[in-house]
Image: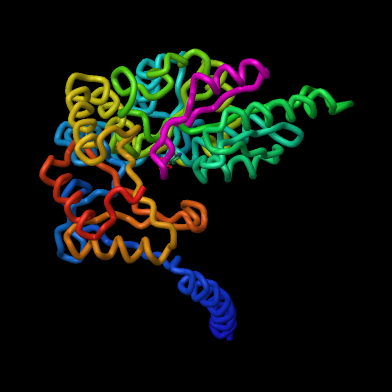
């Protein structure tokens, strides 16, 4: 009886969901998980077939790096596998603290806090900074983690056109007029501007210095998501804020350890007070089991490598591969614009048949009608591999479609 009830309930659910899936399929938006049978590297194995991988965010080739692997193995020996609890209960182990000390010194800020993922860092941080009555102003192309956090925070969300300083200025001015107009509020509404450093799907860079000038002029705070620039840009791979010399002018610096750092995890860097606040208020930090100590140890090792001569050499190689693929480019993210979702999927499939793995990026990762192939290169690619991809793209008449 009870079982039949459950069955009936799930049949109804499945019917509703199937309808949704059919609709996605008809729009060329069907997705599936591809099972990778090898380590994350320039050559990967899917379904027993080796492909040259131009799709990962492992820009420095650290995900399968021997030094990083030994650091992780050693940490397992010393600290075990699990952290046992959230950070505030008893899950705050040496490796977490070492990681945060390393991150703060790497990013040249007073303090740092690590999270399980970049997504969790965005969610916990943004929601602890602003709420009802406050304003969040974001670039139109910011990552979903920021959009989700902004919505969850309850603050009023305003969007400025991508990298458009004039539009940002007018949104800030509009906000300023509303900010003073709110009467009877117990505090002045806060204004938080959020942008990325390198945009994840377009690969271009934010005009950070000008954004800093603007937010200073309007007395707003700035949060910069350095997910794709950490390890890639700036002195020692410190990111775009470092490259542009505005490190001290950004209230909240965010990053992830899952891209060029080759591990996983997210972080926030800033003042000691900011980090103390997050420890008290960032719910994704408080109500979540601490990352495995081995992951934290490996992340520390990754940051040390990124900032070292070895990291510098990897960055030199990375930028060489980038220029081999597309002359001068702003980042290792080198999209080839296609337009229609199905056309992007077909192009990716043709590349797959030629032995390359390049993902088709569609809605909701990018706007409707802006589907693309997202080529990413890594320091671990050889010149020959990059050349082979260029040849395949030109055979498919996809080269320089951008
Ligand atoms: C990947 C990414 C994130 C999320 O980081 P994770 O560590 O993968 O959760 C946040 N922002 C941007 C711009 C990203 O590309």
Question: 133 and 178: which one is in front?
Answer: 178
Estimate the x, y position of residue 50 in percent, counting from the top left. Answer: 14, 58
| Ligand 1: quadrant of the figure | top left
Please tell me whether residue 57 is drawn above or below residue 167 in the rendered image.
below
Estimate the x, y position of residue 32 in percent, counting from the top left. Answer: 37, 65
Estimate the x, y position of residue 355 in percent, counting from the top left. Answer: 17, 59
Which residue is at a point 56% across and 27% down the rendered structure image? 278
What is the quadrant of residue 318 in the picture?
top left
Horizontal side of residue 236 vs 32, given as left or right: left
Q: Is residue 74 visible?
A: no
Please tell me whether residue 177 is drawn above or below residue 351 in the rendered image.
above
Residue reaching furthest to the right: 184
Question: 221 and 244: which one is in front?
Answer: 244
Estimate the x, y position of residue 67 in percent, counting from the top left. Answer: 16, 31
Which residue is at a point 45% across and 22% down the rendered structure image? 112
Question: 103 and 362: which one is in front?
Answer: 362
Q: Does residue 259 show up magenta in the picture?
A: no
Q: Is residue 4 visible?
A: yes
Horizontal side of residue 292 vs 168, given as left or right: left
Q: Does residue 207 show up magenta in the picture?
A: yes
In this figure, what is the number of numbered marks?
A: 0
Task: Name the quarter where the N terminus is drawn.
Answer: bottom right
Which residue is at a point 62% across and 40% down the rendered structure image? 150
Question: 297 and 153: which one is in front?
Answer: 153
The span shown in magenta is 197-225
Which residue is at a point 69% across and 32% down the rendered structure image? 135
Q: How are the colours assigned in the image?
A: rainbow
Please tell me whether residue 251 is drawn above or below residue 297 in the rendered image.
above
What is the quadrant of residue 16 in the picture?
bottom right
What is the quadrant of residue 371 in the picture?
bottom left
């Amino acid at each position: 009886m009870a079982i039949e009830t459950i069955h009936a309930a799930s049949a109804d659910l499945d019917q509703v969901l199937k309808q949704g899936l059919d609709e996605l399929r008809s729009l060329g938006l069907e997705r599936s998980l591809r099972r990778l049978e090898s380590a994350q590297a320039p050559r990967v194995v899917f379904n027993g077939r080796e492909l040259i991988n131009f799709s990962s965010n492992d820009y420095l080739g650290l995900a399968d790096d021997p030094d990083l692997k030994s650091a992780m193995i050693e940490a397992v020996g010393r600290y075990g596998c699990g952290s046992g609890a959230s950070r505030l209960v008893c899950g705050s182990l040496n490796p977490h603290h070492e990681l945060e000390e390393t991150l703060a010194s790497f990013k040249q800020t007073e303090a740092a806090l690590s999270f399980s993922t970049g997504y969790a860092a965005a969610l916990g941080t943004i929601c602890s900074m602003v709420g009802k009555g406050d304003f969040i102003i974001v670039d139109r192309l910011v990552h979903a983690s920021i959009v989700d956090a902004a919505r969850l925070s309850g603050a009023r969300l305003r969007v400025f056109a991508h990298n458009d300083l004039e539009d940002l200025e007018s949104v800030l001015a509009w906000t300023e007029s509303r900010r003073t107009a709110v009467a009877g509020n117990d505090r002045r509404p806060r204004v938080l501007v959020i942008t990325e450093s390198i945009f994840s799907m377009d690969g271009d860079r934010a005009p950070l210095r000008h954004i800093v000038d603007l937010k200073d002029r309007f007395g707003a705070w700035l949060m910069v998501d350095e997910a794709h620039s950490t390890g890639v840009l700036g002195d020692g791979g410190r990111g775009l804020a470092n490259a542009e010399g505005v490190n001290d002018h950004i209230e909240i610096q965010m990053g992830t350890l899952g891209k060029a750092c080759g591990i996983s995890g997210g972080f926030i860097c800033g003042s000691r007070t900011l980090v103390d606040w997050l420890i008290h208020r960032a719910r994704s930090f408080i109500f979540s089991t601490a990352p495995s100590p081995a992951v934290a140890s490996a992340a520390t090792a990754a940051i040390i490598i990124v900032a070292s001569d070895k990291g510098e050499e990897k960055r030199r190689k990375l930028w060489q591969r980038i220029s081999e693929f597309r002359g001068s480019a702003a980042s290792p993210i080198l999209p080839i614009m296609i337009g229609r979702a199905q056309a992007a999927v077909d192009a990716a499939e043709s590349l797959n048949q030629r032995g390359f793995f390049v993902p088709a990026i569609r809605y909701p990762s990018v706007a409707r009608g802006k589907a693309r192939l997202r080529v990413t290169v890594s320091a671990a690619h050889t010149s020959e591999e990059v050349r082979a991809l260029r040849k395949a793209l030109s055979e498919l008449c996809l080269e320089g479609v951008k």
